[in-house]
Amino acid sequence: MDIPHDKARLSLFAAARVVARRDFHAILFSRAFFFFLLGPLFPVLVGAMAGGIGGQVQREAAVNTLALAMAPADNAAMLRARERLAPQLGQGLPTLTPAEQQIAPEEILKLTGENYAAVISGTLTAPVLTGPEGPIAYWSGPVALLAANAAADTPAAYPAVTRSPTATSVAAARSDRIRTAQAGQLLLFLLMMLLAGMVLSNLVEEKANKVIEVLAAAIPMDAVFFGKLFAMLGVSFVGIAVWGSFAALIIALGGDALPSLPTPALGWPLFIALGIVYFAMGYLLLGSLFLTIGGMAATVREVQTLSMPITMMQLLVFFLAAYAITQPGSLLELAAATFPLSSPFAMLARAAQFESLWPHALAIAWQALCVLLFVRFGAALFRRRVMKSGKAGRAGKTARRAA
């Protein structure tokens, strides 16, 4: 007995799995994907090298040495005063170096081989600071303090300050966690914008060579969209794993020299786990919109024209979620957490600031529902505009007869 055609078709889940496996292997083992992985590493290397060189230049350019051009006794008193005040003020004091020649301060600043920010001359009761406007404005206060202490020329008695450290305060903890929230949002946004474009390019390519019509004739269009989305998500995780390994190597080599972020409210393991989930949800949401755009567009130029509003909207929702960090519990934060495209950013920031878990369960369920609705809408639009009209419609009918 013949099996009816509709019963011979794969289920939605099985068909999506077939498409996902096909796309995942086709992209993962392509040369283009290898070069795509290397692409972001070069700007990072160049940025790290430029930052290191720039920091070295700034350190070498920063001058905190002042020349002493006073009487020998006054010079010695100024040096003793600096030695007494150094334990209390530390880096707030300039480095004092007696001038080798008793010449005019303007000539001392012109000496080759020396690197003085300014020159101290005059007397202890009437010091004169000669140099450019910026350095003398910056060092006038410390020089006055040194001269006053040197004029007394007696060891001053400084009261001992008893230290009573605390682990943190509410204001300090909130301020620190905002930094972690901002860093998490920025990383999430950069990864999504960098990786989500693969969904659109893959669909446009298969639409151009009529592969998508053949797939749509053999399996449900919803399964095609779901399969492509999850295949691209898997490929994105491979890319993130490669870039994450590279970042871990840099952190291991950099050690304490690299800046560290405060611990989020939920702790690093749970925060990272939620970050992965929110990346997946945000990627699927943005990818479903890109699939819808690919279904509506007939040419690459139309794809670029239609995708621009989505990209601009993604920037706007990112700014909305970033601004909502400063207003926890407000209507603005609720709107950012509810709107599907900004919800992953807003909820990741909430994971850095607050310890409650139940809002994340609700947000993830809501985002998953929105992914389902977006995919079904995009698939229906693709069937209506492509599979039932024009050349694409005739190709779809031919593919159905062949299937």
Image (cartoon, helix red, strand yellow):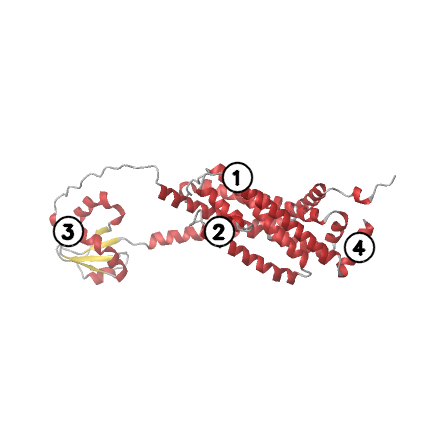
**Looking at the picture, which amino acid does disc 4 mark?**
Lys
| Mark closer to the observer (4, 3) | 4
Quadrant location of the N terminus?
top right
Give the CA separation, mark 3 to mark 1: 59 Å
Q: Nearer the viewer, residue 75 or 378?
A: 378
Give the CA separation, mark 3 to mark 2: 53 Å
The residue drawn where x is 60% and y is 53% is 197
- Which residue is the site of mark 3? 148
Residues at marks 4 and 3 touching, judged by CB atoms closer than 8 Å:
no
**Looking at the picture, which amino acid does disc 2 mark?**
Ala
- In primary-sequence order, the first of circles 4 and 1 is 1
- Which residue is the site of mark 1? 273
**Looking at the picture, which amino acid does disc 1 mark?**
Ala
Give the CA separation, mark 1 to mark 2: 20 Å
**Looking at the picture, which amino acid does disc 3 mark?**
Ala
Q: Nearer the viewer, residue 396 or 367?
A: 367
Q: Secondary structure at mark 3?
A: helix
Query: How dense is the environment of label 3, judged by Cα within 10 Å: few (below 14), some, or many (20 and up)?
Result: some
- In primary-sequence order, the first of circles 3 and 1 is 3
Furthest-right residue in this view? 1
- In primary-sequence order, the first of circles 3 and 2 is 3
- Which residue is the site of mark 2? 321
Give the CA separation, mark 4 to mark 2: 45 Å
Q: Which disc, if any, is residue 397?
A: 4
